Amino acid sequence: MENQNQHLHEVAITAIVVKDGKYLITRRSPNKKRFPGMWTVPGGKMDTSDYLQLPKDTEHYWYNVLERTLRREVKGEVGIDIDNIEYVTSLATVHTDGSPSLVISCMADYAGGNITLKPDESDQYAWVSLEEAKKYQLIDGIYDELVMVENKRNGKKSEWQRFR
């Protein structure tokens, strides 16, 4: 069943969290509907509740809604705080249930807290270098995003591409 409203997408946002030159990856719980047991980065879906209960920042708009969503999702999923959120890339898919999904991939600095996994989301985590990340069964495309972040940290801008 395909979504008939071409403007309606599930919006998700993810964070490649950087701490001491390493990247946080998590293994999705085996009970997850999408990509069970695969390694990824923390993040989640944006809900209208991420802004509707808040006062607008201008007459018509709420600002920093994606950043607020990402902070909430990372805190809820892995228990840490993040800062200095920057855009990396975007990706879209149509899931097997017909839901179109837009994912905004970001990078962020680790800002504090201890990793505490939410068991229904993730069952393992690791802080990895780019080289170490190759040893994990990452969801396709995540490694290339890690390369983009590594490049960005070294002052080199790039759009998503295959880096392997």
Image: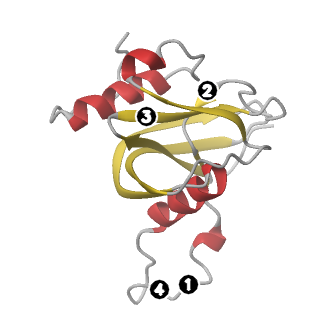
Q: Where does label 4 land, which residue?
A: 56
Q: Where does label 2 land, which residue?
A: 39
Front-most of residues 155 and 82: 82
Q: Earlier in the sequence, mark 1 or mark 3?
A: 3
Badge 1 vs badge 4, beta-carbon distance below 8 Å: yes
Residue 25 found in image quarter: top right
Q: Earlier in the sequence, mark 4 or mark 2?
A: 2
Q: Where does label 1 land, which residue?
A: 54
Q: Earlier in the sequence, mark 3 or mark 2?
A: 3
Residue most extreme to the left:
155
Distance between mark 2 and mark 1 Cα atoms: 34 Å
- Left or right: where 28 falls relative to 93: right
Give how far across and how far down residue 94 sits, in percent.
65, 34
Residue 152 found in image quarter: top left
Badge 4 vs badge 3, beta-carbon distance below 8 Å: no
Disc 1 residue type (three-letter):
Leu
Distance between mark 1 and mark 3 Cα atoms: 32 Å
